[in-house]
Amino acid sequence: MALLAASALLVIFRSKKRFPPGPPALPLLGNILDFPKRESWKVYLDWGRAYNSDILSLKIPGTRLFVLNSAQVIQDLLVKRANNYSDRIGTSWLIPFMNNTERWRDHRRLFRREFDTPEASAVNRSHEVHAARRLLHRLLSTKDHEGDLRLAAVDTILSITYGITPTDFEHPFIKAPEDLNAIFGDVAKGGYMVDLFPFLRYLPAWLPGVKFHKLARRGRPLSSAVVLGPYQEVQNQVQKGIALPSVASKFLYELQEGSIKSSSEIEMMRNVLGNAYLGMSLKIMLFLTFKRIEFLLRRCRHDVSRISKTVCALYNFVLAMALHPEVQKKAQASLDSVLGGTRLPEFDDMTQLPYISAIVNEVLRWHPIGPLAVYHVNSRDDEYNGYFIPKGSMMIPNTWSLLHDEGTFGPNTNQFIPERFLNFDGSLNADRTNMDYAFGFGRRSCPGRLMARDTLWIMAAHILAAYDVLDPFDMEGNKLTSESDLEYTNTMVRYASNLLVGLNTLKLPTVQLPAPHEDHI
């Protein structure tokens, strides 16, 4: 009775607190029926204008959501108060979703060391260059450019992480995450109510509709295969002395030499490698991100996507070049001036190719791949500008709002204009070159953002150096003449789904590609 009384007092206390504005909540249901069905990031921005507030509050069973619509609010809460706003509804080994603990900080520190420092970038860039050249070979020989771009992203991360270069989607280290994706897709269709109402996990598996036990049993060995499979493959190669350069082989050679002795460090590295590897399997990541509110996401049709963020960025780049031939021609002219039409680009050329960097920045800004960033959770009750934010709330940064702010990026932010990142003399505008908004916020920002940007830059430069991107067509063969003709997915990883883009050789064979067998480290 005392516990019930204390709980009731807590509810009464919190109900009298002042929350940020938002649609009126219904009893029990809260704001479930208010969630937008399409392009919620734009709706949240409109709500913010209507309520004259950069922070919105929405109630769902079990917690509150706070939508953060401005850079100032995000800076104040997620950056300046990062000690309080860096938690997650945690999982055991996926770094982006671990709780805010020392274990998470150790994993994040190791991930950054291997993938997100200038020293790591210098090592990893050779893999990215070779993956870009393997992409050019595939573009020459196939017409499945969507598949080519997907495989290029997978190729890059597997090469950097494990020294493995798959040639098709039947490779076992691609199939395992795909199979795991299918299981998470099945769970998502059921709404994953067990996470919202934990008592359901105790129901027997034979009851109608109780299939999460079976799905969990199917998923466990696949999860193990995803983490251990490529690691053990490289382990065998190291023992034979035939492992190719990679983050995994470097670590395992050090382990073989006895310089690493801690079992916890071995487990942590294995997890870090698995996390980098799963970066290509965003369905898994995004499902785990939003599983507590999956039932309302189903209403909003925010289906998790089978396509990774790197692939979506490459799609958006190719799309932008198809829709804006004048930008494409200007980019190719800048490449000609540096490369002379006799070689392919290298990272050493980056400082001489500011227009390519401006295009990459604009690709990340124009149609953000994740218009809503992954939520943060606060560890303690807090107050901000007179508003109460209860412990355990989900803070949703509106990335779209920030990247379309005309005060930051100039006018016409709905248009693709790479020049917004340049000074009058053609050099990069230092005030606008920081595109960290596209990679999350505070201590939960993407720990692989340097690698992601490098991959996009070298792929874009290679495609423009070797090909003309042709006019886009829809699936029925109709030419698309403007962005208004595009149909973007209403997914947490967002891309145009109704177009086909062709490529035409531009400088080949003047630009000589190395033979396919020379494209490996």
Image (cartoon, rainbow, N blue to C red):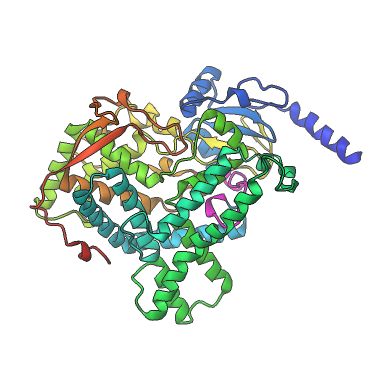
User: Residue at point 66% right, 50% down?
Assistant: 213
Q: Position of residue 368 (x, y in %)?
A: 39, 36
Q: Residue furthest bottom?
A: 257
Q: Residue 266 or 113: which is nearer the viewer?
A: 266
Farthest residue in the right direction?
1
Query: In screen coordinates, is 474 left or right of 220?
Result: left
* Magenta stretch, residue numbers: 80-97
Is residue 210 visible in the rendered image? The answer is: yes
Residue 496: give x, y in percent of width and height: 35, 33
Where does residue 415 sit, x and y in percent of width and height? 30, 27
Please identify the quarter of the rendering in which residue 487 is found: top left
Q: Is residue 273 above or below residue 403?
A: below
269 left or right, relative to 497: right
Q: Is residue 289 left or right of residue 512?
A: right
Q: Specify the quadrant of the image occupied by residue 346.
A: bottom left
> Residue 167: x, y in percent?
31, 58
> On the rendered image, what quadrant is the N terminus found in?
top right
Is 90 part of what is drawn in magenta? yes
Q: Main secondary structure of the magenta part?
A: loop
Q: Locate the C terminus and report the quarter of the image it occupies.
A: bottom left
Residue 80 in view, yes or no: no
Near-viewer residue (455 or 472): 472
